Image (cartoon, rainbow, N blue to C red):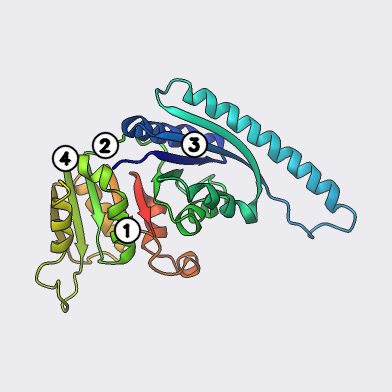
């Protein structure tokens, strides 16, 4: 079963083109409906200004955010005019501190959310809560699309970052429609455990599961020769010329990932190909 409702969230016109192109390509391939939600972000910090100024500042911020949302919606409709798929564009305004809740409310009733990278030069701070809102509160798989990548609904080569976690398995299940159409899938296992039921056959159970779904999978076992797992994963993606990564999202708490870093955050910061995530 493919995806039938695809959602993408636009908060920055500079990132809209690439994200919408990917979402529209998947929607067309799956005969799905594409919902584009354009947010004008109100960045007002209530209580920060002197007494009596709050109402004026708030009204000005809301007016500016409303105008931004309308401009984004017009730009997105222009981009989608040339695509042969069912789509709808909506515009809304949300405060920065609350945008994740708004995204989650829509993501809950979607099969897949397509978003730009939440980290990078000139990427707004609202992109991180948008991504986390879809993943955590919305409980929906997310496809992160770096700028400049060619849109495709059927990646030819996919790397699965497999660590036997529930997050990784949930990502694999959610990505099955794309994995089934891939020409080759690499199950990457880094430093498999020396003890446990799978020590003699790392990734074997997953490979069998995928094979029964018609996925052409092979297992790549590597030692951790680099400081970060994300570095090794990125290098392997380049070595096999993969055009998508599937991995679990945020095995640690979001706070720990934000302060200390983690495989998810590091991978999203340096991703050069689309990254499929679920939590």
Q: Secondary structure at mark 1?
A: helix
Name the side, left or right, on which 126 lies relative to 114. right
Q: The residue tagged with tag 3: helix, strand or loop?
A: strand
| Crowd band around label 3 with a 10 angstrom C-alpha radius: few (<14), some (14–19), many (20+) | many
Residue 165 picture location, percent across and down: 29, 67
Q: CA distance from mark 2 to mark 4?
A: 9 Å
| Circle on res. 154 | 2
Image x and y of residue 223, in percent: 18, 66
Looking at the image, residue 44 sits to the left or right of residue 195; the answer is right
Q: Residue at x 49, y 36 (%)?
A: 35
First along the sequence among labels 3 and 1: 3
Point out the tag, 1 or 2, that comes first from the N-terminus. Answer: 2
Distance CA(mark 3)–CA(mark 1):
23 Å
Q: Residue furthest right?
A: 52
Mark 1 or mark 2, which is nearer to you?
Answer: 1
Identify the mark nearer the N-term, 2 or 4.
2
Q: Nearer the viewer, mark 3 or mark 2?
A: 3
Q: Looking at this rendering, what residue extends furthest in the top direction? A: 82
In the picture, which quadrant includes the N terminus? top left
- The mark lying in front, picked from 4 and 3, is 3
Q: Which one is earlier in the sequence, the residue at label 1 or at label 4?
A: 1
In this picture, residue 144 sits left or right of residue 207: right
Contact between labelled residues 2 and 1, with CB atoms less than 8 Å apart: no
Q: Residues within 10 Å of mark 4 (few under 14, many from 20)?
A: some
> In the image as oriented, which residue stretches furthest toward the bottom?
195
Q: Position of residue 161 (x, y in %)?
A: 26, 58
Q: Disc 1, disc 4: CB below 8 Å?
A: no
Marks 4 and 3 sit apart, C-alpha to C-alpha, by: 29 Å
Tag of residue 183: 4
Disc 1 and disc 2: Cα gap in Å? 20 Å
Mark 1 lies on residue: 170
């Amino acid at each position: 079963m493919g995806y039938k409702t695809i959602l993408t969230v636009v908060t920055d016109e500079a990132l809209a083109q690439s994200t919408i192109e990917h979402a529209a390509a998947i929607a067309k391939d799956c005969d799905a409906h594409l919902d584009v939600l354009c947010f004008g972000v109100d960045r007002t910090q209530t209580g920060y200004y002197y007494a009596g100024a709050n109402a004026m500042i708030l009204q000005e911020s809301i007016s500016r955010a409303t105008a931004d949302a309308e401009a984004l919606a017009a730009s997105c409709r222009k981009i989608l005019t040339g695509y042969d798929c069912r789509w709808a564009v909506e515009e809304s305004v949300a405060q920065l501190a609350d945008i994740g809740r708004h995204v989650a409310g829509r993501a809950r009733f979607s099969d897949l959310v397509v978003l730009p990278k939440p980290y990078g030069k000139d990427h707004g701070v609202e992109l991180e809560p948008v991504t986390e809102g879809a993943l955590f509160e919305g409980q929906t798989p997310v496809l992160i699309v770096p700028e400049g990548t060619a849109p495709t609904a059927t990646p030819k080569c996919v790397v699965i970052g497999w660590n036997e976690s529930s997050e990784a398995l949930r990502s694999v299940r959610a990505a099955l429609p794309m994995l089934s159409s891939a020409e080759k899938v690499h199950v990457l296992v880094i430093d498999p455990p020396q003890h446990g039921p799978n020590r003699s056959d790392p990734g074997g159970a997953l490979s069998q599961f995928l094979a029964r779904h018609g996925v052409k999978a092979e297992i790549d076992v590597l030692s951790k020769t680099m400081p970060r797992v994300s570095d090794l994963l990125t290098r392997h993606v380049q070595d096999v010329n993969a055009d998508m990564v599937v991995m679990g999202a945020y095995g640690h708490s979001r706070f720990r990932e934000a302060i200390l870093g983690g495989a998810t955050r590091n991978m999203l910061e340096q991703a050069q190909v689309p990254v499929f995530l679920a939590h």
